[in-house]
Image (cartoon, rainbow, N blue to C red):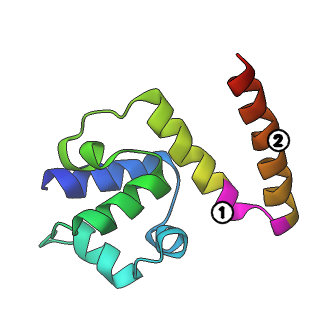
Amino acid sequence: MNGFKANLRAALTSRRLTVGKLSAITGVAKGTLDCYLGARASMPPADVAAKIASALGVTVEYLVSGHEAKAREKNIGAIIRLLVELSERDVETVLAVTKVLEGRAEGT
């Protein structure tokens, strides 16, 4: 199993995501994702790898090399995954809270 394939599979498993769900989150066709996980395991272009990594809360570096991402990068990916699941109203609430936090950060 090549590195990308193994790391993608591990990230999917640890996040309890199916290939279908990852496809819905990223907009990458399920068949394309299956190619990355299949017997011939191809490597995606950089832009697709970035979408996949973001949806899984990992870095492209992790998917390629298996090295863990920095905690902040992992958290950002996790936040993005959660935002995708929220209603529009809840996203607006999160945005409002984020603006308050941004103001507090600027004041420190």
Q: Which residue occupies the foreground of this view, 85 or 31?
A: 85
Q: In which quarter of the image is residue 8?
A: bottom left
User: Is 60 colored magenta in this rendering?
Assistant: no
Task: Give the magenta range.
Answer: 83-88
Find residue 84 and name its label: 1
- The residue drawn where x is 70% and y is 62% is 85
Horizontal side of 42 relative to 82 (left or right) equals: left
- The residue drawn where x is 21% and y is 69% is 45
Three-letter amino acid code at disc 2? Answer: Val
> Which of pointers 2 and 1 lies earlier in the amino acid sequence?
1
- Residue 2: image x %, image y %? 12, 55
- Quadrant housing the N terminus: bottom left
Q: Which residue occupies the foreground of this view, 104 or 13?
A: 104
- The residue drawn where x is 35% and y is 48% is 10
Circle 1 packing at 10 Å, graded few (<14), some (14-19), many (20+), is some
- Residue 92 vertical placement versus 60 (above, below): below
Find residue 25 and name its label: none
- Residue 31: image x %, image y %? 34, 83
- Residue 94 vertical placement versus 35 (above, below): above
- The residue drawn where x is 30% and y is 61% is 49
- Residue 88: image x %, image y %? 81, 67
- Residue 101: image x %, image y %? 76, 32
- Residue 5 vertical placement versus 32 (above, below): above
Q: Mark 2 points at which residue?
A: 97
